[in-house]
Image (cartoon, rainbow, N blue to C red):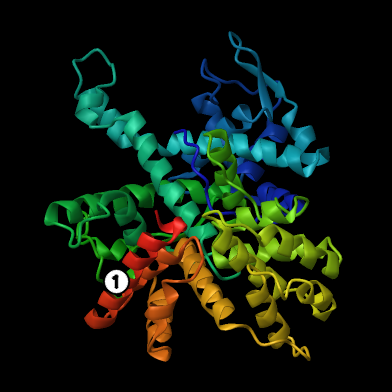
C-alpha cells in the first residue's frame, strides 16, 4: 500500500507514555520474558521457532494454560526472535543467545522501545493475514498427496488478505483521528466491516453484499483477537451465543439494537501511534497535532484548513502557546489576507484562532479596521471582547464579510446542514439580499450565490440566487 494522500492529524500521547504502554502489552512482555528464560539448552528449528518438545516449558514459564497455551507461547517466541530479543547463533545446531533487544527495552530511549514494539506489530500483522491452522492442515490434506499447500483448496489469497486488513485498519485510523471528543469511541464491528465491503453509492445493501459483510465480520473477529495482545486495539469480541451452530455464520446484523454483541473495537493510543508509523512508511502524509507549532502563521492557517474542527483548535492552541498574544495576532492577520481561492478559509481559521487570544491582542485588531479584507472580522472580534468605540461597518463591508464567510464554510464543509441553515437565515433576514449581493467585489461572489441557489429549499428564492450568480459572473472580472 502506497499513497500520497493527506490524512487528518492525529493527537498522539507522549512517547514516554507510549513506551510504557508497549512494555506492558501481553505479547511483548511475554517475548521479553522468554528472552530471559532462553539459555544454552534452548533449541530452535530451521525457521527459528522453538522445537516442539520445548514449547510446554516455554508456556509454563509464561504461566499459560489451556488449549491456547502452546500457540500463545510459540507466538511470543516468534516475536522475541523477530524483534532481536533473541538471536539464532547456529542454524545447524539450533542454538540461541540473547540479542540486542533486551538492552533496548530495559535501558533504551522511548523511541528504542517503540522501535522494538513496531517490529513486533509487523510480526503480528503478518500472522493475522494467515488462515487458521486447521484450515492449513485441511488444505494440505486436500492437495495432491505431496504434502504441498494447496492455496486453491484453502481459498486464501495472501495479498488480498493483507490488503483487506490494511483497508480495515486504515478506516479505523480515520475514524479515530476524526473524533471530535477527547478519546476514540468503540466502533461496531458490523459498521467497520461494511465500510470496506459496501460500495459508497449503494443506498441499500443487497443480500449478497450483506453476506459478504457477515463473512468479513467473522474474519475481523479472528484478526482483532490476535491484534489485542500486542496492544494495537481494545476489542470486545463477537458474542459466541449469537452463533446457533459453530459452523454457521450469523446473518449480518446491521440493524440490531444490541450491536455491541456483534463486536466492538477501538484503537489504543499505542495503536494509533503504530498505524501512523505504518502509514508514513507507505507514503501517506499523516500529520500530528503540534507539527505546525514552530511554523509561521501562513503555514498554520493553510495547514489547519483541512483539519477537523477539534484538531484545528488543538493545533492552534499549540501554536499560540509559543507566542506573545499581540505579536501572534498581527502575524495571523497578515497571513489571512489574499484574493486566492483558499483565502476565505484562511480568514475563517484566523478568526477562530483570534477567538483564543486574550484582550491584549486588541491593538492588532484596531490596526486593520479600515482593511477591506480584515475590517469585518476585526469588528466582530472587538465586539465579542466588549471593546469600546468600535466604528460600525459599512453596508459594503457587511456584504463582503457575508460572502467571505459563506465561501469559507463551503470550502470547509461543502453542502452541510449548518451551511444550509446559514443560507436560509441570510435570505430570510434580508429581503433584498440577492439584489445587492451580486455586486460585491469578492472573487467568490458568483460561486457563493450559485451555492445559495443550490442549497435554499424555497424554489423562488433559489431562482433569485441563481439569477444573481449569473449577473455576478457576467459583470465581475472574478466571475469569468
Query: Which of these two is toward me, 282 or 22?
Result: 282
Please give left or right for residue 396 compared with residue 96 in the image. Answer: left
Residue visible at 21% across and 54% down in the picture: 249
Give the camera-side residue of 202 and 93: 202
Residue 71 x/y as whole percent: 47, 38
**Residue 405 visible, this angle:** yes
Q: Is residue 75 in view from this perspective?
A: no
Q: Residue furthest front?
A: 475
Which residue sits at x=42%, y=41%? Answer: 166
User: What residue lies at 43% left-to-right and 75% top-to-bottom?
Assistant: 437
Please tell me in which quadrant of the rendered image residue 236 appears. Answer: bottom left
Name the image quarter holding the N terminus.
Answer: top left
163 left or right, relative to 194: right
**Is 405 placed left or right of 416 in the picture?**
right
The quarter of the displayed image where residue 109 is located? top right
Residue placed most toward the observer, 183 or 407? 407
Q: Position of residue 10 (x, y in %)?
A: 60, 54
Q: Residues within 10 Å of mark 1 (few under 14, many from 20)?
A: some
Residue nearer the viewer, 369 or 206: 369
Q: Residue at x 46, y 46 (%)?
A: 226
The percent position of residue 86, horizontal first and vertical second, equals: 67, 27
Q: Which residue is mark 1?
A: 467
Looking at the image, residue 473 sits to the left or right of residue 321; the answer is: left
Task: In the rendered view, tell whether residue 451 sits above or below residue 339.
Answer: below
- Where is residue 134? Give x, y as percent: 30, 36
Amino acid at each position: 500500500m502506497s499513497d500520497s494522500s493527506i490524512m487528518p492529524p492525529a493527537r498522539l500521547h507522549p512517547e514516554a507514555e507510549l513506551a510504557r504502554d508497549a512494555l506492558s502489552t501481553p505479547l511483548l512482555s511475554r517475548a521479553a520474558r522468554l528472552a530471559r528464560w532462553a539459555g544454552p539448552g534452548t533449541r530452535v528449528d530451521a525457521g527459528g521457532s522453538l522445537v516442539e518438545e520445548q514449547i510446554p516449558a516455554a508456556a509454563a514459564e509464561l504461566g499459560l494454560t489451556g488449549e491456547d497455551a502452546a500457540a500463545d507461547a510459540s507466538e511470543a517466541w516468534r516475536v522475541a526472535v523477530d524483534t532481536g530479543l533473541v538471536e539464532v547463533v547456529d542454524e545447524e545446531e539450533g542454538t540461541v543467545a540473547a540479542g540486542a533487544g533486551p538492552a533496548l527495552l530495559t535501558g533504551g530511549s522511548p523511541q528504542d522501545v517503540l522501535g522494538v514494539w513496531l517490529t513486533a506489530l509487523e510480526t503480528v500483522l503478518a500472522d493475522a493475514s494467515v488462515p487458521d491452522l486447521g484450515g492449513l492442515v485441511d488444505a494440505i490434506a486436500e492437495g495432491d498427496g505431496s504434502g504441498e499447500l494447496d492455496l486453491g483448496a484453502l481459498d486464501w489469497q495472501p495479498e488480498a488478505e493483507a490488503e483487506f486488513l490494511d483497508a480495515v485498519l486504515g478506516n479505523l485510523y480515520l475514524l479515530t483521528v476524526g473524533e471530535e471528543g477527547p478519546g476514540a469511541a468503540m466502533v461496531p464491528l458490523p459498521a467497520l466491516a461494511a465500510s470496506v465491503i459496501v460500495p459508497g453509492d449503494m443506498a441499500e445493501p443487497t443480500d449478497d453484499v450483506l453476506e459478504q459483510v457477515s463473512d468479513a465480520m467473522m474474519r475481523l473477529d479472528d484478526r482483532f483477537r490476535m491484534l489485542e495482545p500486542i496492544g494495537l486495539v481494545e476489542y470486545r469480541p463477537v458474542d459466541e451465543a449469537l452463533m446457533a451452530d459453530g459452523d454457521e455464520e450469523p446473518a449480518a446484523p446491521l440493524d440490531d439494537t444490541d450491536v455491541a454483541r456483534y463486536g466492538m473495537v477501538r484503537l489504543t493510543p499505542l495503536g494509533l501511534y503504530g498505524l501512523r508509523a505504518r502509514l508514513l512508511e507507505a507514503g501517506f502524509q499523516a500529520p500530528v497535532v503540534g507539527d505546525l507549532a514552530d511554523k509561521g502563521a501562513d503555514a498554520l492557517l493553510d495547514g489547519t484548513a483541512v483539519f477537523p474542527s477539534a484538531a484545528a483548535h488543538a493545533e492552534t492552541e499549540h501554536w499560540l502557546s509559543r507566542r506573545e498574544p499581540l505579536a501572534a495576532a498581527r502575524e495571523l492577520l497578515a497571513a489571512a489576507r489574499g484574493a486566492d481561492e483558499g483565502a476565505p478559509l484562511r480568514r475563517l481559521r484566523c478568526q477562530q484562532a483570534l477567538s483564543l487570544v486574550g484582550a491584549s491582542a486588541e491593538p492588532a485588531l484596531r490596526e486593520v479596521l479600515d482593511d477591506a479584507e480584515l475590517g469585518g472580522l476585526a469588528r466582530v472580534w472587538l465586539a465579542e471582547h466588549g471593546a469600546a468605540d468600535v466604528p460600525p461597518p459599512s453596508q459594503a463591508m457587511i456584504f463582503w464579510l457575508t460572502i467571505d464567510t459563506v465561501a469559507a464554510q463551503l470550502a470547509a464543509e461543502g453542502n452541510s446542514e449548518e451551511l444550509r441553515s446559514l443560507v436560509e437565515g441570510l435570505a430570510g433576514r434580508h429581503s433584498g439580499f440577492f439584489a445587492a449581493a451580486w455586486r460585491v467585489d469578492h472573487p467568490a461572489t458568483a460561486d457563493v450565490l450559485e451555492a445559495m441557489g443550490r442549497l435554499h429549499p424555497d424554489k423562488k428564492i433559489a431562482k433569485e440566487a441563481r439569477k444573481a450568480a449569473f449577473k455576478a459572473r457576467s459583470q465581475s472580472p472574478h466571475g469569468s
